Amino acid sequence: MSKILGAALPNMPWQDKPAGCTDPVWRYSENPVIGRNPLKNVARIFNSAVAVWKDGYVGAFRAETKNGIPYLYIGFSKDALHWDFQSEKIMIQDAQGNDVTPSYAYDPRLIKIEDTYYFVWCTNFHGAALGMAKTKDFKTFESLDNPFLPFNRNGVLFPRKINNKYYLLSRPSDSGHTPFGDIFLSESPDLYYWGRHKHVMSPTGDWWQSVKIGAGCAPIETDEGWLIFYHGVTGTCSGFIYSMGAAILDINDPSIVKHRCKNFLLTPEKDYEERGFVPSVLFPCASLQDAQTGRIAIYYGAADTYTCLAFTTVDDTISYIKEYDINRGK
Ligand code: BMA
């Protein structure tokens, strides 16, 4: 039996595995959780992140406004399914209080470390790059500048310091639709200065992840190591297809991949994943987990249009990763 290390979360969204399901991850029967035109002036919310907040949940949402530009919105929820969105995008200040709200912002991750919540997203820094900001109250958001030079995407912080340092996964890219991409790990003493970069994983010969990969949900601490859900991309005659994979990284040195699954855990196959603004995109950005039961709820964007939910347990996923470990040649 594998274990999640961390807090119990008894009120998180959950549905048992459907009878007869042999897959390690299963979808929420009421998907999508966020449909089209979810609020005035916003056409789509997808590739978004949730976190525990007070006695409920907070979300950092990629909201595609009706001029086609994505911004970060926040919302609150009692059950992490029904959301009360704020009507305007969040504004970001620097430490002196000057407005530094970017001209676009997308694919947010939201990670709590100690008593502070951190947003990491793709921002406009003379092209696509990582933006980072922090908040304690979801009223004011202070920029932590740009961790890296352009171009970079899919920045995901670890939820705690390791050996007293902060760690960030990221994917150096180009400023367009990037036909390449590996996951790298960077270290920081203070969340401003990043260095000691290490390579973590590359695309593989498994076709679903043969073009590029990028970190998705914040790493989940387990007794086997850091469990990561990431996206893997293949190229087809009609464009890229995004699926979800998983791996386990060493708990003390997360640049070491202990196990990596050669199979995808989810790939677009429902109407809401195959049809939308960008068809066949399944893009995980966040999870909620309960250390008591080992349950995990994964939030993912579908077809650059919807926000959806899938479920697994730490045991289902870790035993599947090991069974189909890339190093076992199965
Ligand atoms: C990537 C990002 C994601 C998006 C994906 C598919 O480059 O922009 O936000 O989901 O493309 O369009």
Image (cartoon, rainbow, N blue to C red):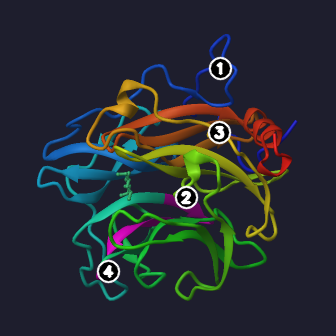
From the image, tell me which residue sits under label 1.
17
Tell me how far mark 4 sits from mark 1, CA to CA: 43 Å
For label 2, the crowd category at 10 Å Cα-Cα, with few meaning under 14, some 14 to 19 and many 20 or more, is many
Horizontal side, residue 256 vs residue 188: left or right: right
Nearer-N-terminus badge (4/1): 1
Classify mark 4 as within 8 Å of ligand 1 or not, answering yes or no.
no
Asked which secondary structure carries label 2, the reply is strand
Horizontal side, residue 276 vs residue 4: left or right: left
In the image as oriented, which residue stretches furthest toward the front? 237
173 up-or-down from 187: above or below:
above
| Picture quadrant of ligand 1 | bottom left
Write the start and end of the magenta stretch as one range: 110-126
Tell me how far mark 4 sits from mark 2, CA to CA: 22 Å
Tell me how far mark 2 sits from mark 3, CA to CA: 30 Å
Residue drawn 55% across the image and 40% down it: 298
Residue drawn 25% across the image and 58% down it: 70
From the image, tell me which residue sits under label 3.
9
Residue drawn 40% across the image and 65% down it: 178
Find residue 10 and report its horizontal and vertical position in percent. Answer: 65, 33
- Residue type at mark 3: give it: Leu
Nearer-N-terminus badge (2/3): 3
